[in-house]
Amino acid sequence: MRKHKNTILFVISWGLFIGLLLFSIIRLQQDSKIVNYTGIVRGGTQRLVKLELSGQPNDPLIESLDQILEELHTGNGPHHISKSHDLAFTEKLQDLSAMWKDLKRDIEAVRSTGGALERAALLQKSEAYFTLANETVFAAEQSSEYKLTFSLLLTALLTFVVFYGLMHLNKRQNAKLNRLLYTDPLTGIANQSAFADRALYLLRDNPSISYALVYFDINNFKYVNDAYGYETGDALLQAIAQYFDRHLSKSELCARINADHFALLTFNGEERDISLTKRIRVCIDQAVSDGIELNIADSLSYSFGIYQIVDHAEPVNSMMDKANIALKQAKNHEEMRTVSYNDALFAKLQRERQIEARMQSALQNAEFLVYLQPKVEISTNTMIGAESLVRWVSPEFGFLPPDEFIPLFEKNGFIAQLDFYVLDRVCRKMRQVIDDRLSDSFSISINLSRVTLYQDDFFERFTRIVERYKMPPSRIELEVTESAFIGNQEGILSVLERLKGMGFLIAMDDFGSGYSSLNLLKLLPIDVLKIDKQFLRESSKGDRSYRIIKCVIEMAKALDAQVVCEGVETKEQVDFLAQINCDIGQGYYFARPMAIADFEVAYNLH
Ligand code: C2E
Ligand code: CA
Ligand code: CA
């Protein structure tokens, strides 16, 4: 709208300017015509007198001069001379016309008498006439010059006014545009671009101040929006933004980067990361309790990414990227909410990016290999099954154990594809050896990430693969960790119950490593309890741990679940497990995870 208005103003100004210029040119033309024709009157009269005196009267010339003079007076006539309104000129012209009448009378006299006296009088009159005509021409010229000067001055003035006005408008518009570009519309504080710009100057102007660039965001902001409505969410952001805007010193900065994401350029002082976070946290809490009537300050949590600025000349964008990297890392840590950027973190992320760039093609190129680790019945020392464990052998990264890529794949969701791929490979291999070379009780364990279990079509995809290879469900054991049940517990339980109903075995993996919920054991129909390797390691340390592991085994037995102890590395551990009636052991003592081909050789399955 504003732009439209300016364009109209611009067009009008230019129209006025061009109109004035045209008007001046036309006026100039008319004025020069007046000068010319006055000049003709002057010259023509001289000629006429000359002719009369030499006995050659010229009436058409008289008529023509009459006409021109008349036209100069009235502005009407065939020569299209316009009437001049210049006072000096019109007075002279009137005198000239009066004298012209006298002159014509003198001509008459010469014609009728032809006497020397009359001729002398005519000559004398013509001299006076010439002088007056000269003055009239001069007056016309002067009038024309005045007008021209006036027009030029007016045009220049108008041009100046128009351009000055436009420049002023432009400046105002630019200022408004700048405000829009550099201000966060919700909170009124600086936005990301403004932050980057101002940080550059602050760092340059304060070389002796030690600064930290801190990114922070509200972990449960979505909860605020959902529970209290968007208005409260907005008010919360505004309260935080305005608090920092008011309370920071002139040499510090704050900005809202996006959503619930803020940036601070603040003094670092002697404090380091955690205490810096604490200081900011106090400010945020104060901002929230000052600015929000609801009592929500205590229910909010925040993540902090810190970049300690060492070199003030480092590009601000790079500093902001680093604070952001640290923040992302902080958000991924449930328990560690403050992360300070360091080069190792950067290298880790770089590697993650490389891994992510390659994972899809690695799946297509069959770079993911299934390794098998035997599970051994302790009482008989016989192999009764195996756990499938994936490895990635890549031309770029070499041999990668799962810890290096599975956490990342769980973050980006790729683990679901990988789990189904492993299931497919395992089923295909089992199909080849199953009928004649595997004992009836042999089962193979598949690890399933919680991300995989949460896929909408998990049940369909899982059963489709198993059915494709006509695998008996009793030969497949699904290893699920406790963390899978955080969230949609009912959803996962119902899927697992359906699978159990079909005959698949369900194992609770890493039991005792996390937030072991005994309640879960009550709800989940597990067939196997896999005790985390950490447990076995601890149990050798003392009586208490020994009794705990013993109790866990008894409890599992009471629930009709088989117990598998992971991480069996020594003969002593095997003896210990035998003593406490643990059914199955898995660990380096029996065998390390191995490639399928090696497994087949080792267990005579080829
Ligand atoms: P997990 O399911 O607990 O697997 C057991 C891990 O313990 C394996 O590590 C195995 O190599 C290791 N291990 C076995 N015996 C011993 C021992 O005596 N001592 C010690 N210190 N370690 C032993 P790995 O193969 O590196 O796998 C790590 C984790 O990666 C697995 O832990 C599992 O959570 C995950 N994982 C592996 N393959 C897959 C997969 O195909 N899908 C999913 N979703 N996760 C997988
Ligand atoms: Ca496992
Ligand atoms: Ca485990």
Image (tube, rainbow, N blue to C red):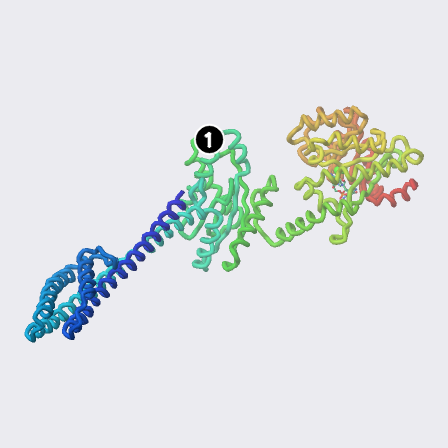
Left or right: where 327 falls relative to 76 = right
Q: Which residue ends up furthest to the right in the rendered image?
A: 436
Q: Quadrant of ligand 1?
A: top right
Query: Residue 170's spot in the image, x, y percent?
Result: 38, 52
Task: Note whether ligand 1 is within 8 Å of mark 1.
Answer: no
- In the rendered image of this protein, does residue 588 appear above or below residue 145? above
Q: Is residue 578 something that shows in the picture?
A: no
Q: Is residue 60 something that shows in the picture?
A: yes
Dividing the picture into quadrants, the one containing residue 578 is top right
- In the rendered image of this protein, does residue 583 appear above or below residue 135? above
- In the rendered image of this protein, does residue 244 appear above or below residue 295? below
Left or right: where 194 falls relative to 501 = left
Of the pair 112 and 414, the residue shown nearer to us: 112
* Residue found 53% across the figure and 53% down from its top: 317
Query: Residue 280's spot in the image, x, y percent?
Result: 48, 44
Query: Residue 237's spot in the image, x, y percent?
Result: 47, 38
* Residue found 8% across the figure and 75% down from its top: 120
Callout 1: few (<14), some (14-19), or many (20+) C-alpha neighbours within 10 Å?
few
Query: Residue 100's spot in the image, x, y percent?
Result: 13, 64
| Secondary structure found at label 1 | loop
Count the labels in the image. 1
Of the pair 96 and 185, the residue shown nearer to us: 96
Residue located beneath label 1 in the image:
295
Of the pair 162 and 33, the residue shown nearer to us: 33
Q: Which residue ends up furthest to the left in the rendered image?
A: 117
Of the pair 471 and 496, the residue shown nearer to us: 471
Dividing the picture into quadrants, the one containing residue 604 is top right
Q: Which amino acid, by three-letter code, is at mark 1?
A: Asn
